[in-house]
Image (cartoon, helix red, strand yellow):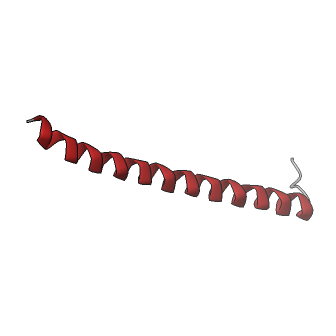
Amino acid sequence: MNKLPDENTLLSMLEKFEEAEKTAHNLSNMATEIKQKYQKRIQEVQPAQK
């Protein structure tokens, strides 16, 4: 049967997972901002093309 990692290893892993979560959250926010920017631009350009 496998042994669980010690407490220090688990705490280190938790810190890395928290950093990864923050990075993913920041990337998600950035992607949302880019999407909104270009959606707005497309809406401005489309009526001009008709």
Q: Which sits in the foreground, 18 or 7?
A: 18
19 left or right, relative to 13 = left
- Residue lying furthest left in this view? 50
In the image, what residue occupies the spot 77% across and 55% down?
16
Q: Quadrant of residue 47?
A: top left
Q: Residue at x 64, y 57 (%)?
A: 21
Q: Residue furthest top?
A: 49
Q: Residue at x 86, y 55 (%)?
A: 4
Q: Please provide percent x and percent y for residue 36.
A: 35, 52
49 vs 23: above or below:
above
x 36%, y 50%: residue: 37
The percent position of residue 10, horizontal first and vertical second, equals: 84, 60
Residue 50 on image: x %, y % = 8, 36
Against 46, residue 23 (above or below) is: below
**Residue 44 percent location from the top left of the image:** 21, 47
Q: Quadrant of residue 14?
A: bottom right
Q: Is residue 3 left or right of residue 48?
A: right
* Count of marks placed on residues: 0
